[in-house]
Amino acid sequence: MTTIEPDRAFGGGDLEPYDRALVDPDRALYLVDSDGTRDTIDVAKFLASADVHDGQALSRARGPVIDLGCGPGRLVHAAILRGHVALGIDASVVAVRIAQEQGLPVLRRSIFQGLPGEGTWGTAMLIDGNIGIGGDPVELLKRCAELVLGHGHGRVLAETHPDSSRNRVFEATVIDDLGRSSLPFPWAEVGIHALNEHAAAAGLVFIQTWVQGDRTFVEYASVS
């Protein structure tokens, strides 16, 4: 099984710009790939309440929900309000602390480590670009399938890259507007076309896709 250490996860290690931005969200934060291309990271969204688009994704959840790469826990909170048992998993010390200070059930752990309730989750969620975690979408989706395997037709809900043709894996860093950088970490960006191929390779069955605003989501089923 793939293992991603916390300091090789999103924005971890070195000067910790992601963790710093979570407590100072006025900082500009960027995801930078190996050729220097920068994409802005919307930290304020992570700290806000779930929006209507998040709610539409959660409306498709069934059974207990595990949110992978949950950040400060907005979707965990929203899932609980909808009556789900929910758990969040994240590698960021600060994100987990913020969530736990709100009383949310969130653990600091690699997704690829042992997790509570293995195989019993009804829905695994990969939102906010978290299909990139680990830089290997097939292995990540296989892991999601393992988490929901014992729940009949468990669900995996993922948000894709807005470019439907995107399909790339790269070493990324996170930097802020003060020049503080994380350690490099493996990441992926995947649009809907490639994601459907990766999901099939992981043993998942396509259910539906939908677009809301500038966000694209897809639902898969795990067939046990």
Image (tube, grey):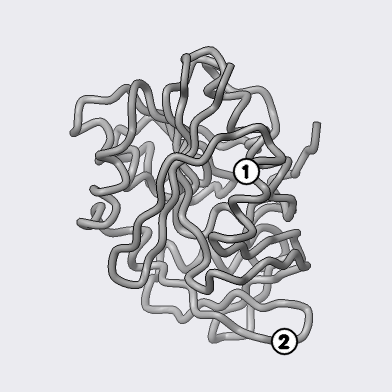
Element at badge 1? helix
In which quadrant of the rendered image does the C terminus lie?
A: top right
- For the residue pair 95 and 62, the one nearer the viewer reads as 62
Any mark on residue 20, and which? none
Mark 1 vs 2: CB contact within 8 A = no
Q: Residues within 10 Å of mark 2 (few under 14, many from 20)?
A: few
Separation of marks 1 and 2 at Cα, in angstroms: 29 Å
> Residue 151: x, y in percent?
47, 15
In which quadrant of the rendered image does the N terminus lie?
A: top right
1 or 2: mark nearer the eye: 1
Amino acid marked by disc 1: Ala
- For the residue pair 68 and 173, the one nearer the viewer reads as 68
Residue at the disc numbered 1: 199
- Which residue occupies 46% across, 55% down? 159
Q: Earlier in the sequence, mark 1 or mark 2?
A: 2
> Residue 164: x, y in percent?
53, 69
* 143 to the left or right of 89: right
Amino acid marked by disc 2: Gly
Relative to residue 126, is residue 223 depicted above or below?
A: above
Element at badge 2? loop
Number of numbered discs visible in the structure rendering: 2
Q: Quadrant of residue 51?
A: bottom left
> Residue 170: x, y in percent?
77, 68
* 97 to the left or right of 31: left
- Which residue occupies 38% across, 37% down? 100
- For the residue pair 151 and 127, the one nearer the viewer reads as 151
Q: Residues within 10 Å of mark 1 (few under 14, many from 20)?
A: many
Any mark on residue 36, and which? 2
Relative to residue 38, is residue 165 depicted above or below?
A: above
* 121 to the left or right of 14: left
> Residue 212: x, y in percent?
29, 63
